[in-house]
Amino acid sequence: MKSRVSIVMIIVGVLLGTFLFMNRAHTPVPNPDPNHTHADFAVFLGGKKVDFSLAKYMSGLSTDDTTHDEENEYHDEHLHLHDNNGDVLHRHKPALTIGAFFSSLPGVRYEGSTFSIDGVAATVRLFVNGVENKDSANHVFTDVDQILITDATEQTEIDHELSLLTDEACLYSRTCPWKGDPPTENCIADPSIPCLE
């Protein structure tokens, strides 16, 4: 009987140790530059995800793909997409809204609860980290938020779209070091709010 109890205690100890090690290994760390933040996002209209990885939405069009700091290389110097990643929004200045980001992209507008792209408008809802947010286009995201903009009305469809959001923003913000290093990225900042990287 004592040997069974000992074996059970050893197994429990090993499992507990493994659990504690894994949790410690995947503990988020603070963003080293709180003025350079990122959010995962997706827009679904008519049940289809809008593809923001298209070249027309990317920064880095005018000169090269290795840096993001040349003049006229971005649609907005403080809010942009790059590296052909249409799932992660980059912000280089605090307090800018999600609506300002989308309105900086060619052919896109997000005002109030209306999202329009290439002349087609839809009434949408905004979900931040799975919770509906009534601020809509005026929402100011925080680092590593997951943002869904959708015209869906059925909860099952909304839940499905939420499940498709990426979790790559933490890589760019360097808050999930277990995922590795992000692509090289220069921070374009307001001179009064400099980057810390």
Image (cartoon, rainbow, N blue to C red):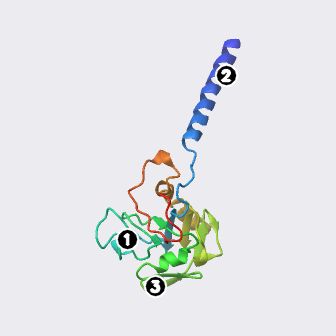
Identify which residue is drawn at 39% across, 56% down. 183
Q: Which residue is mark 2?
A: 9
* Amino acid at pointer 3: Val
Dot 2 falls on a residue whose secondary structure is helix
Name the image quarter holding the N terminus.
top right
**Residue 144 appears at what percent x and percent y?**
55, 59
**Residue 22 appears at what percent x and percent y?**
56, 38
Residue 155's quadrant in the figure? bottom right
Dot 3 falls on a residue whose secondary structure is strand
* Mark 1, other Cα within 10 Å: few <14 / some 14–19 / many ≥20: many
Asked whether residue 1 is in view, the answer is: no
Which labelled disc corresponds to residue 73? none
Q: Nearer the viewer, mark 1 or mark 2?
A: 1
Mark 3 or mark 2: name the one nearer the start of the chain. Answer: 2
Quote the CA–CA distance across marks 1 and 3. 24 Å
**Residue 85 appears at what percent x and percent y?**
40, 63
Q: Which residue is mark 3?
A: 120
* Mark 2, other Cα within 10 Å: few <14 / some 14–19 / many ≥20: few
Q: Toward the viewer: 197 or 127?
A: 197
Q: Toward the viewer: 95 or 138?
A: 95
